[in-house]
């Protein structure tokens, strides 16, 4: 499936990206890129400082809604793995060893996401975090050939895409917040890793009542409406790293 962009084709894509004036235009460009590279999906995914998710691309609507409903943001190895990296990542390099990660992967494949993927972590000037991803259903050799042939183009386009998204949404910057205490950081970290409250309390050797105090304190400091919101804000602001 080796597809390489000629200079003229790449210039045309970047010109369309540069001229994008709203979300619909970005969506159209993402679909053009998907078709050009002949992959199943191409997605730009932003996790905001408030825990909201924003993006465009070709994932099925059913999968996007299911992802949000299942709170997969907390366990998605692509999000969690790329948040700690600055370099592009082939999904095979990520940790899929946990039961939760394997179940997530099977669910994603069942929804047509693909068994192969390549993600470029992106960051803005104020700590913003986003991912530019291509995914496909295919064998390892073909995918390795594809990424080797197109890596430089994908990285370049990813940064152009992120720049345009920042330009269109300048308000997407993290709000200032209070510093979390060490115990609050521990609690938020384990919750972000997918631990239940009972498991977190046991791991920290504290009662669930005491844990609830830490969680509520962190939620208040982060200005979050619930625990999931608090975890997302803590992750996006770099207050916890998993």
Image (spheres, rainbow, N blue to C red):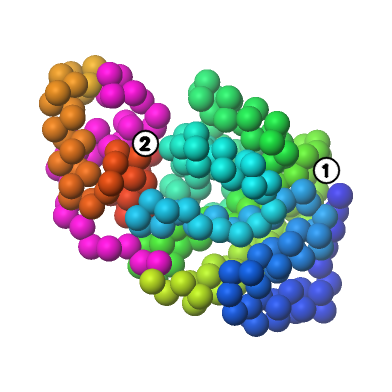
Residue 128 horizontal side relative to residue 6, left or right: left
Residue 6 or 23: which is nearer the viewer? 23
Q: Quadrant of residue 33?
A: bottom right
Q: Which of the image's four quarters has the C terminus?
A: top left
Q: Which residues are magenta?
A: 172-200
Secondary structure, mark 1, is helix
Residue 14 horizontal side relative to residue 8, left or right: left
Residue 99, image x, y percentages: 52, 20
Q: Quadrant of residue 127?
A: bottom left
Residue 89, image x, y percentages: 59, 48
**Chain-order first, disc 2 or disc 1:** 1
Residue for badge 1: 142
Mark 2 is surrounded, within 10 Å at the Cα level, by few (under 14), some (14 to 19) or many (20 or more) other residues, namely many
In the image, what residue occupies the spot 64% across and 35% down?
A: 108
In the image, what residue occupies the spot 80% across and 38% down?
A: 138
Secondary structure, mark 2, is helix
Residue 111 or 188: which is nearer the viewer? 111
Residue for badge 2: 192
In the image, what residue occupies the spot 68% across and 46% down?
A: 60
Residue 113, image x, y percentages: 69, 41
């Amino acid at each position: 499936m080796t597809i390489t962009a000629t200079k003229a084709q790449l210039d045309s894509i970047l010109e369309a990206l540069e001229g994008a004036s709203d979300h619909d235009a970005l969506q159209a460009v993402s679909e053009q890129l998907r078709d050009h590279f002949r992959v199943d999906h191409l997605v730009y995914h932003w996790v905001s400082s408030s825990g909201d998710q924003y993006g465009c691309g070709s994932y099925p609507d059913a999968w996007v809604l299911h992802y949000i409903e299942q709170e997969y943001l907390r366990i998605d190895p692509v999000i969690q793995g790329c948040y700690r990296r600055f370099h592009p990542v082939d999904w095979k390099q990520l940790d899929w060893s946990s039961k939760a990660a394997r179940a997530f992967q099977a669910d994603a494949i069942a929804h047509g996401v693909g068994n192969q993927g390549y993600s470029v972590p992106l960051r803005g000037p104020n700590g913003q975090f986003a991912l530019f991803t291509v995914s496909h259903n295919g064998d390892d050799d073909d995918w390795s050939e594809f990424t080797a042939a197109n890596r430089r183009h994908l990285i370049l386009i990813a940064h152009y895409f992120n720049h345009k998204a920042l330009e269109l949404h300048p308000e997407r910057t993290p709000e200032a917040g209070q510093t979390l205490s060490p115990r609050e950081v521990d609690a938020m970290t384990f919750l972000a890793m997918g631990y239940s409250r009972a498991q977190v309390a046991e791991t920290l050797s504290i009662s669930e009542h005491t844990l609830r105090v830490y969680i509520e304190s962190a939620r208040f400091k982060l200005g979050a409406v619930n625990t999931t919101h608090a975890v997302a804000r803590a992750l996006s602001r770099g207050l916890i790293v998993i």
